[in-house]
Amino acid sequence: VDDGNEVCANCGKQGSDTVKLKKCNACQLVKYCSVECQKAHRKQHKKACKKRSAELRDETLFGQGHDWPEEAFCPICTLPIPLPMEDHSTISCCCMKEICDGCIVAAQKRGMFDCAFCRT
C-alpha cells in the first residue's frame, strides 16, 4: 500500500525529489534508494520476494486464459470435458446435452441405461 511515506527498505532513507526510490523488479513490494541497498537487503528480502513474485507470475498466467464455452463442461459433474470432446463424451439426442463418458459409465453402473441427464 502506497501511503506516501516511501522509504528505502534497507537504510530507511526517505524518498524525495533528489532520492528516487526504485521498486524491487521481482515482487514490487519494497523500494530501494540504490543497487547497493538492494544487494545488502537481499538476504532478508529473498523469501518474501520469491513468494510474491510467484504469486504475480500465477496471476499473470491465469489471467491470460480464455473462458471456456458452456458446452465444454459436463452438465452433470460440471467438469471440463477433455479435448477432443467427441472422444470423451456423447451427445444425447433427447436433450441435446453433451455428457462426459465418466457420468455415462456412473449412470450405467447404477442401472440407468437411458439418458444420464434427462433420464428419458
Image (spheres, helix red, strand yellow):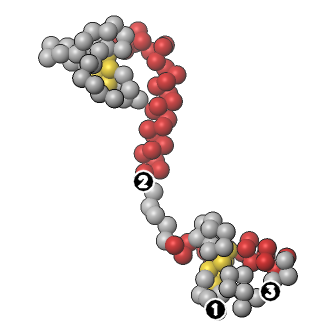
Q: Secondary structure at mark 1?
A: loop
Circle 1 Cα neighbour tier, 10 Å, few/some/many (<14 / 14–19 / ≥20): few
Closer to the camera: disc 3 or disc 2?
3
Task: Give the residue at x 76% y 88%.
Answer: 114
Considering depth in this image, is 63 or 12 the residue closer to the camera?
12
Q: Amino acid at mark 3?
A: Phe
Which quadrant is the C terminus positioned in?
A: bottom right
Q: In the rendered structure, which disc, 3 or 2, sits on the residue that comes first in sequence?
A: 2
Say which residue label 1 marks. 93
Give the Cα distance between marks 3 and 1. Answer: 14 Å
Residue 91: x and y in percent read 63, 84
Lateral position of residue 96 relative to residue 13, left or right: right
Q: Secondary structure at mark 2?
A: loop
Residue 25 visible to the viewer: no
Q: Please name the amino acid that badge 2 sits on.
A: Gln
Query: Which residue position holds label 2?
Result: 64
Dot 2 crowding, Cα within 10 Å, few <14, some 14–19, many 20+? few
Q: Nearer the viewer, mark 2 or mark 1?
A: 1
Instruction: Give how far across and how far down residue 76 sits, in percent.
Output: 66, 73
Work out whether residue 28 can be spotted. yes
Residue tagged 3: 113
C-alpha distance separating marks 3 and 2: 41 Å
Residue 74 lies left or right of residue 26; in this view the side is: right
